[in-house]
Image (cartoon, rainbow, N blue to C red):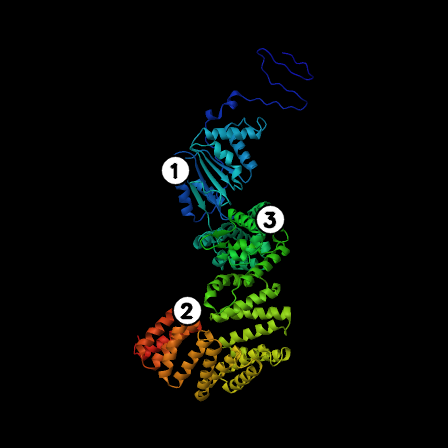
Amino acid sequence: MEANAERAASIGGNNYAPVQTGDHATVVSLSPEALRPPDQVSARAGLDTLAARPGLFVGRTGELDRLDAGLATPGGAVVQAVHGLGGIGKSTLAAHWAATRPHHCAPIRWITAHTSAGVQQGLAELAAAMQPALTTAALPIEALAEWAMQWLASHTGWLLILDNVNDPADIAPLLAKTHTRGRFLITSRLATVWHHLPTVVRLDVLDEADALDLLTRTATANAPGRDLDGAADLCAELGRLPLAIEQAAAYIVQNPLITPRAYLTLLYHYPAQMYRAGAVGTPPERTIARIWHLTLDRITALQPQAADLLRLLAWYAPDQIPATLLGELADPPALNEALGLLTAYSMIAPDPATGTLALHRLVQALARTPDPNDPHRTSQLIDQARTHATIQLDAALPATWDTPATWPTWRTLLPHIDALADHAPAHTDTDTTAHLLDYAGRFLDNQGQLAHAITHIRRALTDRLRLLGSDHPSTLASRNNLAGVYRLAGDLVRAVPLYKQTLADRLRVLGADHPDTLISRNNLANAYRSAGDLERAVPLYEQTLADRLRVLGSDHPSTLISRNNLAGVYRLAGNLVRAVPLYEQTLADRLRVLGSDHPSTLASRNNLAGAYRSAGNLVRAVPLYEQTLADRLRVLGSDHPDTLISRNNLANAYRSAGDLERAIALFQQTLVDRLRVLGPDHPSTLASRNNLADVYRLAGDLE
């Protein structure tokens, strides 16, 4: 053999020795033992590597049992996956299970698999553990990883835990090359890519008892007698998310003067700081703020609009968010891609059966909390999301609030309107917010949820005063609406002055003949009537009727309303001589102008029947009540509030006529229907229960 180049080396014959070329070469000597094929290398004891086992582990019995069942499966390779939201406790579950359950597996190796490089590094470390002479100084890391995969493919009984897999492609070569009786346990935030595996465990939040147990035992580990006031409320506020509870408990342990109640207060006033505040010694990546920041980094790298979508969803209630509220955030393909990514990373949970979305309340809280240290949560981005959420809710409102056909939509939207009102600071409200809250308040008024209605309409009035001024028609409308809810709630001390102020302002701003001014005069008369002040109510009703006849004409619906109202106040005053003819005229006019099936016509027939009953003329009253009930059942349906009123009124007429058997049956049916349609707290439901009790009393059924 010849070596004729500069610094060339030549070895011939039976001479064997290390050969070094180059100026800085390193000589590595490997024994023949180190180069044994992987299938001839046996695993010795002591090669297990596990993440630190949690010092405190609570609950998860069902999930542990499912992993046990998968491990007991006979045959070839068994691959199991645990997926869930970041911070839900996937790694904790895997570490606890691996340390306590699969004792017959050897070796048990933990690989941090969030990248392909992490997988390769974990396999290289396995190779070096099997053959200590095999290091990156001897072989490239790729060769070490390949050696480890060959070892796994030729042996049985091992368990690999692949923790925090972000991309199935990172572990695909490993799974493809190791078809043996080995075991894999995968943990991942990805939810939708493991459907082909035999065992997939979706990890959810802790139940109430386990969440409280985790917080209590952690917080009292070194201080058994410390004050735990507010512990259950804190667990609920944190959505029973294990990492959030551990983070809060560690903070409480570190700060002996902080109770769970005090932590809640800090969370309310300083959310951004508290979401990223860990105790001394807590790795920065083990805080809620950091763990979801990293998730959003990955998601937005794939689809930037996914983060916009998450911030939008943060302003709604956490459950049953209609897909219609997503609006035109992006074109349909991009929106679907964003939804798919958020679903895949367990940030949202779609329900195909209902067409709604859900997400963890703490994900929402973080996503709507500005933090200058997080580019995903700047004040500008969060303001944009809140504005967009408000616009979407307002656009989704039904055209009316008093039509039963729209009530399912209202009941679907109302929790999300409430959530927006709860979480949006009042000073950020826009005119759209004011409209949304005012309109929702009118629906709540119609449903008898008066305290709830007052809260929304009062805020809408405050918003409009600030944004539009005291004389704007919308501001005057909100003041009128607030007065109306106070009147229905029996708070006439507040209602009457508001009605007076609104009437005075409308007279000044709109003029005496404007329709809204006439409405205000009518409403003030209603308030006086409710207060029993008929002396003031009657002249106002008479003036309003005269003005509407002059301005709007005798056939205008508002004129007919005024005639009906004047007849009503005459009836209350005991002046049936005036009341009955007015009711009769109003019914005749409504039949002519509106038709026999118009709701106002049906109301007139009901009112005329009431006047006949008050006059003791049951011969005329009962047939009118029966006809009105039949017509309302046909026109409005059995669940409309007016239909329920008709059934109640007919029952009253039967009671007055002494026909208690029919009265009881109708009162019973009305109560059942009002409980179902209006709910147990609606004033009409309470009236029905009272009426039924009274007719039982009359029938002698005191029991």
Closer to viewer: mark 3 or mark 2: 2
Report whether residue 363 is seen. Answer: yes
Categorize mark 2 by other alpha carbons within 10 Å: few (<14), some (14-19), many (20+): some
Name the residue carrying label 1: 73
| Quadrant where the image shows the N terminus | top right
Decide which of 338, 204 is in the foreground and name it: 338
Name the residue carrying label 3: 304
Decide which of 446, 236 is in the foreground and name it: 446
Categorize mark 3 by other alpha carbons within 10 Å: few (<14), some (14-19), many (20+): some
Looking at the picture, which amino acid does disc 3 mark? Pro
**Distance from Cα at disc 1 to Cα at disc 3:** 42 Å
Q: Can you give x and y, in whole percent of width and height, for residue 565 in the image?
A: 49, 81
| Label 3: element kind | loop
| Label 2: element kind | loop
**Distance from Cα at disc 3 to Cα at disc 2:** 48 Å
Give the quarter of the image for residue 270. Answer: bottom right
**Distance from Cα at disc 2 to Cα at disc 1:** 58 Å
Q: Can you give x and y, in whole percent of width and height, for residue 227 in the image?
A: 49, 58
Residue at left offset 59%, top offset 58%: 388
Closer to viewer: mark 2 or mark 1: 2
Q: Can you give x and y, in whole percent of width and height, for residue 661 in the image?
A: 30, 76
Decide which of 253, 110 is in the foreground and name it: 110
Residue at left offset 44%, top offset 89%: 577
Q: Is residue 442 above or below residue 571?
A: above
Name the residue carrying label 2: 637
Looking at the picture, which amino acid does disc 2 mark? Gly
| Label 1: element kind | loop
Decide which of 624, 74 is in the foreground and name it: 624
Residue at left offset 49%, top offset 64%: 410
